[in-house]
Amino acid sequence: MHLTLSAAETLVVDALVRNRVDEANAHSVARALVAAEAAGQGGHGLRRVEAYAKQAKAGKVDGFAKPRLERPFPAVVRIDACHGYAYPAFDLAVTALPEIVLQQGIALAAVHRSHHAGVLALTVERFAEMGLVALMVANATASMAAWGGRKPVFGTNPIAFAAPIPGADPLVIDLALSRVARGKVMAARQKGVAIPADWAFDRNGEPTTDAVAALEGAMAPSGEAKGAALAMMVEFLAGALTGANFSFESSSLFDDKGSAPGLGQMLMVINPAASGGKGVADRVAMLVGEISSDPGVRLPGRRGQTARRQALEHGIDVEDEVIAAIRTL
């Protein structure tokens, strides 16, 4: 089905409100999921609506939760997502941090008792559009083993970075530390199709093309031992240092069973002028120019930015079975 972005957001809001979600929270979630869909990240887009809604109806996520912010230090805020969706907590961070960054030169937000972080690029890019640099990490339900092991202990634990570029769209880097985002395996399971053999392992630690076996096993880390080490780093930052659950303590984001996931996200925002002086914009432009001078190079984030612009003008195509699943909630 072809939908405008506005119609897609309305579809999501209506489904969530019918399943015990406050309307303001539903709008926050809908904006994030539709933006992910528009950027070509379907695994974090409308395919998540069914699980999100069922979790709210079951009470696994509190659809009426309002995030709470405290400021224990001048440059630090702690945000309690109160076992609600992550996106209202991110909206609160986007509102609170810019003023702190202007005062302090840097700001840190530690989010705990949170939910699925979605496409981190969409959050860090909001700061880059204000002329700020942002770095964000998040943990997720355990789906990846430590290098050499079989037991899932880390999530796919994404890292995202965004920086303003003079006269151009921001530079945006967003990557899961598994070979692919787990949402792609979830999408393959929903479609009933096979996955590439290098995406994941089954319970026995053997490569698998079966999406169901992959979800029951472990994701393959990006860069093998290096990716697993980075996932451990994110676990410290997003789990331990925020006071959130570790990945292995968290319940599944794909079903309505168990307690609230209680995940964590950490967001650091920097005023470039505070760290690099008045000439930092020219230095950034020089670096980007040097990178882009190679005709085979495309700056990270450009594909998603282009897709979202096209979607804003022309709308998006969503699989009929996804629309049907949302409408029957």
Image (cartoon, grey):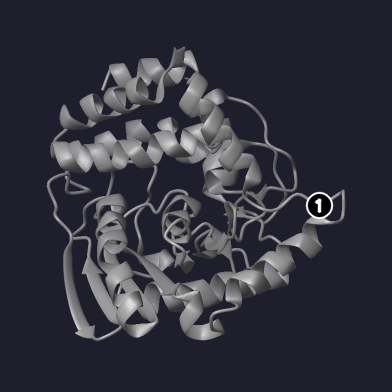
Q: Work out whether 108 lies above or below 120.
A: below
Q: Position of residue 83 (x, y in %)?
A: 21, 57
Q: Tell how many labels.
A: 1
Residue at the location (24% across, 30% down)? Answer: 13
Q: Nearer the viewer, residue 210 or 308?
A: 308
SS for dot 1: loop
Estimate how packed mark 1 is, as few (under 14), some (14 to 19) or many (20 or more) residues with alpha carbons within 10 Å.
Answer: few
| Residue 190 shows in the view | yes
Q: At which x and y percent is residue 187?
A: 53, 33
**Where does the image place residue 274, in percent across and percent down from the top left?**
46, 83
Question: In this figure, which residue is indicated by the disc labeled 1?
Answer: 297
Residue at image point 42% right, 72% down: 269
Q: Within the image, what quadrant is residue 261 found in?
A: bottom left
The residue furthest bottom is 73
Identify which residue is drawn at 12% across, 46% down: 64
245 versus 129 height, above or below? below
Residue 183 against residue 145 in the figure, above or below: above
Front in this rendered view, residue 147 or 237: 237
* Type of amino acid at the residue the image marks with label 1: Val
Task: For residue 58, say whether it is visible.
Answer: no
Residue at position x 59%, y 54% in the image: 167
Q: Quadrant of the C terminus?
A: top left
Camera-side residue of 111 and 283:
283
As drawn, which residue projects farthest toward the right? 295
Instruction: Give residue 131's position: percent from left, percent from top.
Output: 46, 64
Q: Looking at the rendering, which quadrant does residue 292 occupy? A: bottom right
